[in-house]
Amino acid sequence: MKKWVVRFLSLLVFNVVVLLVIGWLTPARVGWSALWAGVILTALTIWIKPLIHKAFTGMVAKSANQRTRVGEKLVQGVLVFIVALIVWILTVILSGVSVGGWLWGYILPPVIILIGWAIYDAIDDRVESSAGALYDRATGSKSTSTSVPPPAIASPETAAARRELDDGLTEEQRRMLDELDRS
């Protein structure tokens, strides 16, 4: 339970910062709605984004053999952008964020969200270990280690099989499920 709380809260703080950047760089009015929109964006990122991505991946997989490598990369890039666009539109609908202008209000924010997701993916282990230490200090619990243990190194065959599984989960979500299995 602690791991889920720490992950949710650390991603929430990061998403609020991303929403404030969106409010600063685009005509989207975020303001105090950033807090509620951050909760919605975090929930959508953790639970809905993988489902949407899996559905779209299934649709485009049927014609994957007809595309070149460059074409496949382009389709995957467009797919990731469409998922971010859907997450942004749902965030706008379910929160108090107001958007002005089509290009700057609906096209640029998903790009900023994608950049935010990439940054968070690069620093998530350090952020979660720091947040875990804060959580332990706030609850008064004693932890044997304040950092997240590094994931077990899998053999190349196992890593390749996992990637080929194509279950629609991000690496972070797979790691969370693996940690749940170990607990």
Image: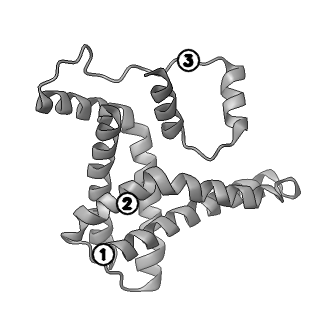
Which type of secondary structure does the marked residue at label 1 adopt? loop
Up/down of 100 relative to 151, above or below: below
Tags 3 and 2 in contact by the CB under 8 Å rule?
A: no
The residue under label 1 is 97
Count of marks, rendered view: 3
Label 1, label 3: how far apart the Cα atoms are: 42 Å
Residue sticking out furthest to the bottom: 101
Camera-side residue: 93 or 124?
93
Q: Point out which mark residue 153 bears.
A: 3
Give percent across and percent down for residue 112. 41, 62
Circle 2 residues within 10 Å: few <14, some 14–19, many ≥20: many
Secondary element under disc 2, as helix, strand or loop, is helix
Amino acid identity at mark 2: Leu
Please report contact status of discs 1 and 3: CB closer than 8 Å, yes or no.
no
Pointer 1 or 3: first along the chain: 1
Amino acid residing under circle 1:
Val
User: Circle 2 is placed at which residue position?
Assistant: 41
Q: Quadrant of residue 139?
A: top left
Nearer to me, 123 or 54: 54
